[in-house]
Image: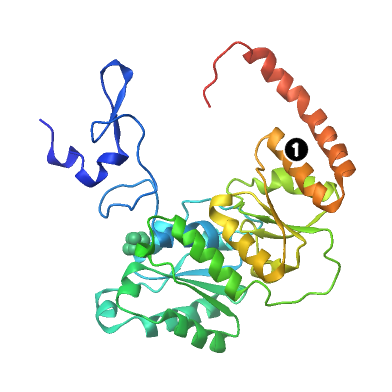
Amino acid sequence: MELKSSATLPERALHIALKVEGGKCQRGDGAGCAISSNSATTPGDMTERGCTYAGCRGVVGGPVKDAIQLTHGPIGCAFFSWGYRPHLADTDFHMKYTFVSDMNETNIVFGGEKKLLQSIIEASREFPEAKAVFVYNTCSTALIGDDGRDVAKQAEAIIGKSVVFFECEGFKGVSQSAGHHVGNETIFRQLVGSVEPEGDFSRTINIVGDYNIKNDIRTFEHLFEAIGLRIVTRFTGNVGVDDLKIMHKAALNVVHCQRSATYIADMMKEKYGTPYINVTLWGMKHMAQALRDTAAVFGLEAEAEVVIERELAKIKPKIDYFRQRLTGKKVFI
Ligand code: SF4
């Protein structure tokens, strides 16, 4: 007997495909295999993607290593967003601690602005080494109308550091994707360009849309440096608040995840005239192409070829080892 809890919710029929006899599969509405995606999540049901808050807190803001990451909402939202993405960095402050205003029923009835202000002040006193406080709004605090922007302004005056308020309440968009947009837009508006450093930035780039989830930055940063370029800001993997503030100084944005981060590259192009190129930084062929495309902007083509040749020569024995053993075999990765 099929339990009621096992039955497909009608709203989810287009997102589920079942294996049927003969190895074929059938979607919940009886049609073919292709499941429908990028449509609104169904509350109360498991979905593949997080909410807008998760996209903003978990993907874009969360990797900033020296900011206090404070959720304005119930403890559940904060726990949901904490520790499930290993955006690594050379310090672990952002991974080790999570902060929340811990809204309970009373706060929902009487408002949570005072509690938020108190949370920001307390957290920044407890961790004076933090360079800024990032505050993320959630469904419940948005629904009761807490004015987080105003609280952030008040808090900034009290603690003397940037307090960045992300209007990323969970229900705001179809999925976490809307949160990437909010994250990009808020960081651009509140941090980028707030400091004007001196120096020569003619041969500099930003790596945009890499989140250093498994230390991936380590695999490619030195290659850009080897062709003569300096990386100003990583948006946002292994990055500090001060780096974000001077992001506008770089001569080129090299955009890796185009889905989550083209927003900021577009805004920088419009406001500062910073050009950008789209690249893929994973895999040898793509990486070599990324180096060539980047080098072409700076007239460093010859330097790029030297680096590509040297790196490919280093890795060739390892590839040969596997090629010998795997030729003619099917490999599942
Ligand atoms: S912000 Fe809203 S949708 Fe996201 S975890 Fe919190 S309650 Fe759930």
What residue do we see at 72% from left, 63% from top?
274
Residue 77 falls left or right of residue 10: right
Q: Can residue 103 be spotted in the picture?
A: no
| Disc 1 residue type (three-letter) | Ala
Between 314 and 21, the one lying in front of the other is 21
Q: Which residue is mark 1?
A: 288
Residue 199 falls left or right of residue 289: right
Residue 141, given in percent of the width and then of the height, sits at 34, 74
Label 1 CA crowd tier, 10 Å (few <14, some 14–19, many 20+)? many
Quadrant for the N terminus, please. Answer: top left
Please tell me in which quarter of the rendered image ligand 1 is found: bottom left
Q: How is the image coloured?
A: rainbow
What residue do we see at 57% from left, 13% from top?
329
157, above or below 124, in the image: below
Q: Residue furthest left?
A: 1
Residue 3, given in percent of the width and then of the height, sits at 13, 37
What residue do we see at 28% from left, 52% from top?
42
Q: Can residue 111 be spotted in the picture?
A: yes
Dividing the picture into quarters, in which one does residue 73 lie?
bottom left
198, above or below 98, in the image: below
